[in-house]
Image (cartoon, rainbow, N blue to C red):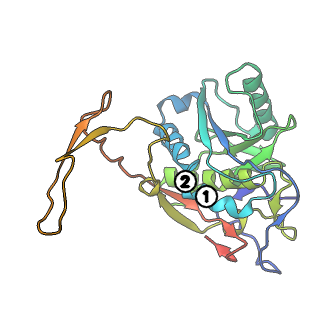
Amino acid sequence: MPLNVVRSKGIRKAAPAAPPQLNYQGGPLLANPEVTTIYWGSAWNSDPLRAQMDAFFDFVVTSSLLAQLAEYNVPGFTIGQGKHVQSVTISSNPASPLDDSQIQLMLDSLIADGTVGQPNANSIYFFFLPSGVTVTLHGEASCQQFCGYHNLSSSGVVYAVDTYDDCQGCQFVSGDTLASSTVVASHEFCESVTNPHLNAWFDDNTGEEIRDICEGQNKTINTANTASTLAAGSAPLFNVSISPAQVSIDGTSDAQFQVTLSPASGASPSPPPPKSSQSYVVQKEWSNAQGACV
């Protein structure tokens, strides 16, 4: 069985007896992941981490991090860009400790009453818990044995859980809760894409998934590296005129033109300012092709 958790700091695996190798077990992938973020607890109403994590998911579903996963495409499942489809805050406060079974019940309730959208073959629901809430899974506790996990609910829905990463065991970037949270979230996001039903890509010998192998190895990705293009068929921002419209060239003199740009109808009078860049710390993932964490 796959591991499907992010271990707490200090809990590290023994060196593998054989080099890591992810093997495909035949299960589905999330070809175009659709992420719903769920913030459980009234503390999230005033916590800036909520907006920061939403911005992270807005970015990561079309980022180079997702593009790397194309190595693990299989017939019927080609991994491509996804969407951050919804963000929900639950005003009621979760119990502490909060067992995984209670999270599954909450997820079923949110789907049933329409608070979150109905699941499809690409859906993943990301739960975030407030600071101080202990989550339990299979007798283990958050901040002690793990910091996050992904799972398939008893009703067949893909979901992930990220406990608040301000405790010592989950501070993967010391003193930076946002960076520690994006490390954990990126871990579970990529494993949910490549092993959503826990029967797709993992190492037969160790049960480790694409990110488990690389725990403790991080990198920085930046929103400035994401290309921004106009959609096909969208209206141009400017009309172009060239004067003179025609010239005869005989090779004896230089030809000179004046190019004028004027705002197109309905367009802004000047190009939009470039987006400010944002850097995110994420965990590296295992590449079978390169035999390394990348």
- The residue nearer to you, when weighing 161 against 200, is 200
Above or below 175: residue 160: above
* Within-10-Å neighbours for mark 1: few <14, some 14–19, many 20+: some
Name the residue that disc number 2 marks: 63
Q: Give the percent coordinates (x, y) of residue 57.
A: 56, 44
In the rendered image, is residue 257 in sight?
yes
Q: Which residue is mark 1?
A: 67
Q: Count every numbered label the image shows and give the total.
A: 2
**Is residue 145 among the parts visible in the rendering?**
no
Q: Identify the mark at residue 56; answer none if there is no mark.
A: none
| Left or right, 242 with reference to 165 | left
Q: Secondary structure at mark 2?
A: loop
Q: Amino acid at mark 1?
A: Ala
Identity, as a three-letter code, of the amino acid under mark 2: Ser
Q: Residue at x 58, y 58 (%)?
A: 65
State the image coordinates of residue 141 (x, y, percent, origin top left): 74, 49
Bin the neighbour count of mark 2 within 10 Å (Cα to Cα): few under 14, some 14-19, many 20 and up: some
Q: Nearer the viewer, residue 272 or 248?
A: 248
Residue toward you, 96 or 47: 47
Mark 1 in CB contact with mark 2 (< 8 angstroms): yes
Q: Give left or right: position of 51 versus 20.
A: left
Front-most of 145 and 69? Answer: 69
Q: Residue at 58%, 41% (x, y): give it.
A: 131
* Residue at 19% across, 57% down: 248
Q: Secondary structure at mark 1?
A: helix
Give me the C-alpha separation between circle 1 and circle 2.
Answer: 7 Å
Is 225 on the left or on the right of 152, as rendered?
Answer: left
Q: Position of residue 294 (x, y in %)?
A: 61, 70
